[in-house]
Image: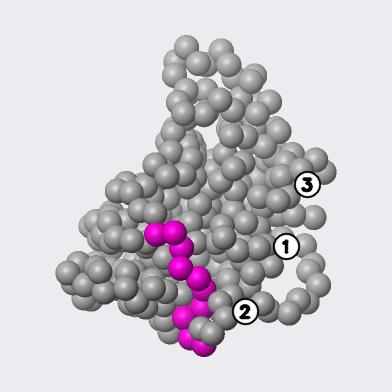
Amino acid sequence: MSEAGNEHKRRASLSPQQPRRAPRLAAGRARALGLPTRGTTNANRLRRVDRWLVATQVPRLRDSARPLVVDLGYGSSAVTTLELVERLGPEVDGLEVVGLEIDPERVAAVAADRDPPRVDFRVGGFELAGLQPVLVRAFNVLRQYDEESAAHAWDTMRGALAPGGLVVEGTCDEWGRRSAWVALDADGPLTLTLAARVSDIATPSDLAERLPKALIHHNVPGQPVHSFLRAFDAAWAAAAGMSAFGPRQRWTAAVEALGEQGWPLVGYSRRWRHGEVTVRWSAVAPT
């Protein structure tokens, strides 16, 4: 497995949590857990997370006896699921992608796009329809939940993974220019990734609006994620002279500065030129 893949297998240090009662995510749904999303779907909206998946998770899929991927909450059309197949398929022999939606009408609407086992669509929610995927992409599905319910959804998805599997849960704006996601395995969160069309932001902290539910309400003074974003903004300001070479070069210089300050960054530096930065969850987890 590549260095990037190995990095994502290392455990994060999670703060102790008090036991909590698992909330019901949707009254009256005994099997498919969750609520329908707004269904907003635009072609190429999830390109940033998909590029990260291709760059970091292909070894995980290749090592699996059954490289099954679940696209949870694909929305009102099949476009982003089909794009995921197109991006991962050339890299992984025998890839299977299953799009899950809790709304049966949405599943029926994409019946013409089925091509099992390569790509299929089923009714399902956070329980993952009884599947055991190696990889789950769950984007823009948890913003409507409160933090406790979102945490329970994390637990439910993690519990359904195949051995060695990974959940990638996050959000992005309507056009996919600003994104943030968390990678989680069976033991908990591993990393936080921020990704942007760098020419579209004034400061890195503009991405705070896209933080996952587990972090967005903790972006306040005294919390680690707030400190990280403040440090990123300061590094961005200090790298202003690199703007003459373009916003990507400025972003890269700012990320390099974060690493020099001791922030535990993950992955290859070439990902920074794509407007990405990945940091260990232990450095940003709520306290």
Residue at 29%, 48% (x, y): give it. 43
Question: Do we see residue 222 in this rendering?
Answer: yes
Between residue 140 and residue 89, name the one nearer to us.
140
Q: Earlier in the sequence, mark 2 or mark 1?
A: 1
User: Residue beneath label 1, please?
Assistant: 14
State the extent of the magenta-drawn residues as a range.
30-39
> Where 213 sits versus 116, above or below?
above
Measured from the top left, where is residue 280 in percent x and y?
Answer: 63, 51
Q: Nearer the viewer, residue 58 or 139?
A: 139
**Within the magenta stretch, is there residue 212?**
no
Q: Quadrant of the C terminus?
A: bottom right
Q: Provide the residue designation for mark 3.
A: 223
Q: Amino acid at mark 3?
A: Gln
Residue 115 lies, in percent from the top left, at 18, 72
SS category of the residue bearing label 2: loop
Disc 3, disc 1: CB below 8 Å? no
- Image-quadrant location for residue 159: bottom right
Direction from residue 105 to residue 134 in the image, left or right: right
Three-letter code for the amino acid on which mark 2 is drawn: Arg
Q: Residues within 10 Å of mark 1 (few under 14, many from 20)?
A: some
Of circles 2 and 1, the one toward us is: 2
Residue at (47% x, 12% y) in the render: 244
Q: Is residue 104 left or right of residue 261?
A: left
Residue 101 picture quarter: bottom left
Callout 3 environment at 10 Å: few (<14), some (14 to 19), or many (20+)? Answer: some
